[in-house]
Image (spheres, rainbow, N blue to C red):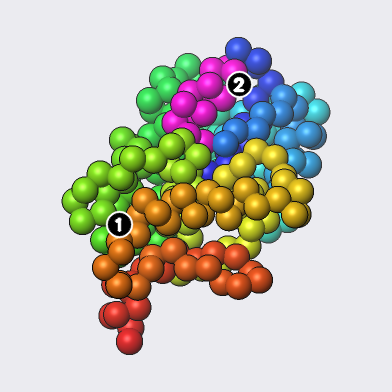
Amino acid sequence: MRILVIEDEKKVSNFIKQGLEEERYIVEVVNDGVSGLEMAMNNQFDAILLDVMLPGKDGFTVLSELRDAGVSTPILMLTAKGTTEDRVHGLDLGADDYLPKPFSFDELAARLRSILRRSSPEKTTKLKCGDLVLDTVSHLAFRFGQEIELTTKEYALLEYLIRNKNRILSRSTITQHVWKHSFDPESNIIDVYIKRLRSKIEHEDGSKPLLQSIRGVGYRMRDLHHEKNHA
């Protein structure tokens, strides 16, 4: 999951970045409102952490311009001013949540998980796709009750696929949300990671695969229970 942090206090942004990366998020940081707005308008993010007091353009202006432009990315506002008036103003402009400074990282992470849940069909911290379960708090994956050992990048890839289950995702879309940088179009890095992931989550029992390749397009995580119920 790719997160944009728009925060001008370097100490705070570094604290957030380090913590989120330990939680297996991909994190981009910008330190002013103008750059933050440009970054959010021109790139795909799963959530934005937006400070109110910013140079260039304040957080309320950035928020308002993003929503006016039709950007629906979940936004968590951060502010040193925790007044009711500020919170109401931010929420009315389209913020999804509000966190006054100073805050603990645990609360920040919990609020981030919360706004991500609201924008996802899954409303719990445990994401499911058929018999596959991903716990977004413990960062553990299970299938048929058995834990699956995943690397940090494999976990990030699996979380993104499950959050978008039953959708066909192109390689470029996966790259934007799971990797921090773009690859050469000829690179097979996505295919390599998909192959590794498939070897860990699939069962060689003749059952339909959860992770499906769509030739020439990309990949899709299929919820077999969903298909069965709608057959």
- Per the image, the residue denoted by label 1 is 132
| Residue 215 location (% of width, % of height) | 60, 73
- Regarding mark 2 in the picture, which secondary structure is present there? helix
Inspect the image, locate mark 2, and give the three-letter code of the amino acid beneath it.
Ser
- Determine the main secondary structure of the stretch shown in magenta: helix
Give whichever of discs 2 and 1 has the lower sequence position.
2
Residue under the point 33% across and 87% down: 231
Q: For the residues marked 2 and 1, what is the alpha-carbon distance in whole angstroms?
A: 34 Å
Inspect the image, locate mark 1, and give the three-letter code of the amino acid beneath it.
Leu
- Regarding mark 1 in the picture, which secondary structure is present there? strand
Q: Nearer the viewer, residue 147 or 57?
A: 147
| Residue 175 location (% of width, % of height) | 63, 49
Rendered view: 211 above or below 156? below
Q: Nearer the viewer, residue 200 or 159?
A: 200
- Quadrant of residue 23 in the image? top left
Q: Nearer the viewer, residue 205 or 61?
A: 205
Residue 68 seen = no
Badge 2 density bin: few <14, some 14–19, many ≥20, Cα 10 Å:
many
Total residue callouts: 2
Residue 40 seen = yes
Residue 127 within the magenta-colored segment of the rendering: no
Rendered view: 149 above or below 106? below
Q: Which portion, as a residue range, is magenta?
A: 12-25
Residue 23 within the magenta-colored segment of the rendering: yes
| Residue 143 location (% of width, % of height) | 26, 54
Q: Is residue 182 left or right of residue 21?
A: right
Q: Nearer the viewer, residue 195 or 105?
A: 195
- Per the image, the residue denoted by label 2 is 13
Residue under the point 68% across and 56% down: 172
